[in-house]
Image (cartoon, helix red, strand yellow):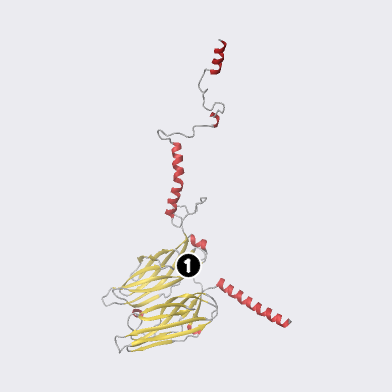
Amino acid sequence: MIVILNLFFAINTSAFTNQAEQKNLLENSTLQEYSFNDIGIFANSLIWDGKGTFELSINKTFDLNNIGPAFLILEFTSEGDRPESPGYSFAGEFNLQPFESTLSRSIIPIDDAEEIRQFAIPLNSEGRIYSNTLILNVSCTNELSSGDSGTLTIKDTSRIMIGKALLLDTYGQYTGQVYPEKQSGMSSLSGLRLRSYIPITIENNTLLEKSTCDLEITLQIIGEISVSLTFFDSSDTTHPFEKNETSENTLDAETQFSPTIGSNFYSIEFVIYSNNLWGSDFNVTITSCIIDFSESQGGFGFSDLEIPFFQWPSIPIVGVVILFLWIMPYSILKYREWKKLPGEVDINILDDEDINILDPEGLTAGDDDDDIEETFDFEDD
């Protein structure tokens, strides 16, 4: 009996310890990288030849050391021809949550089979400690030429990033990490759209409500191209960049956005236009990404003004209008009391000292004769 009780106690103690460890991981989860080699996914090649649809499937279950948002970074090489537009399609699931993306044929290298490039895909699910499942299907279609063939190789240096990244926990300047930092390929007159991602985490609601974020990036541009930039926040709301070309190949851009509570992926969209009719090779690298997380001013110097039963809204001018409408009736009454208008009746003409309860109608006011005395004099006569 004692042995059974000891065993039961040991099992419950172990379960409690595991729960405590998982709770600690939940509270202190930070960004960690797991390469495909670490989780048992080795270099996989999609080989296609001639006409048809070609597909490569990866299905792997693995454990992790931490939990949190998931981000997939694929490193790949290409050899031979490129498939037809749009290029290679990526679709799959991570922990039962689907995702999909497209690797444009315009950024697939064809001249150097050893050149490794990156392609980033935000995942819609979070990583967990046990039994994470990654399903990845890569496919392409080639129907125009039977003589084309090529190979796309997903390298085992590809990785899954799990956990919170760039935690904004106090005001200041932060260095953001952009995935991928480098975009290269063949541009066109109609414009080629590409995205890079910035994972950002903020958990303090009080800090969030009084903050603004300024994003400053520096681009190094090689090629006869023009670049249009747009910033997308976690809800896909667009924020335009203000650009400043500091040199022939260097461009500074700045925008402002409002962060969102929790761990979110923000993105920078590049639209790259060629200055040549047939397109041109380009190379755009983000050499610097600075996030200035600062306290927002409430507007008109009222950010620190505390008024009972009134809270400043997030838009300062709205607060000014509401405050004006709130105090306007009182101000008008006080003004009218200070400066009486012609013909206006003063309703405050009575003072407590002027009220005589024995003579409420004021019959004796201003009368030198006493009616009572006159009555008695008449009777005497």
Q: Is residue 111 visible?
A: no
User: 255 or 41, which is in the foreground?
Assistant: 41
Number of numbered discs visible in the structure rendering: 1
User: Which sits in the foreground, 208 or 78?
Assistant: 208
Quarter of the picture containing the C terminus is top right
Can residue 230 be seen in the rendering of this structure?
yes
Q: In this view, does 8 lie to the left or right of 141?
A: right
For badge 1, the amino acid type reads: Tyr
- Circle 1 sits in a helix, a strand or a loop, which is it? strand
x%, y% of residue 16?
A: 63, 75
Does 245 appear above or below 111?
above
Which one is in front, 376 or 181?
376
Query: Among all residues in the image, which is located at the extreme front?
Result: 379
- Asked whether, in this view, residue 326 is left or right of residue 358, the answer is left
Q: In terms of depth relative to the viewer, which is nearer, 27 or 174?
A: 27
Q: Residue furthest right?
A: 2
User: For this view, does 200 lie left or right of residue 49?
Assistant: right
The x, y position of residue 313, in whole percent, is 46, 56
Residue closest to the far left: 277
Picture coordinates of residue 224, whole percent (x, y): 30, 74
Which of the 4 quarters of the picture holds residue 378? top right
Residue identifier under label 1: 174
- Which residue occupies 55% across, 18% down? 372
Does 65 sit above or below residue 168? Answer: below
Q: Is 237 located above or below residue 321 in the figure?
A: below
Residue at the limit of the structure toward the top, as seen here? 381
Disc 1: CA contacts within 10 A as few (<14), some (14-19) or many (>=20) = some
Q: Position of residue 325 (x, y in %)?
A: 43, 48
Quadrant of the snapshot with the N terminus: bottom right
Corner quadrant of residue 7: bottom right
Q: Is residue 96 above or below residue 243?
A: below
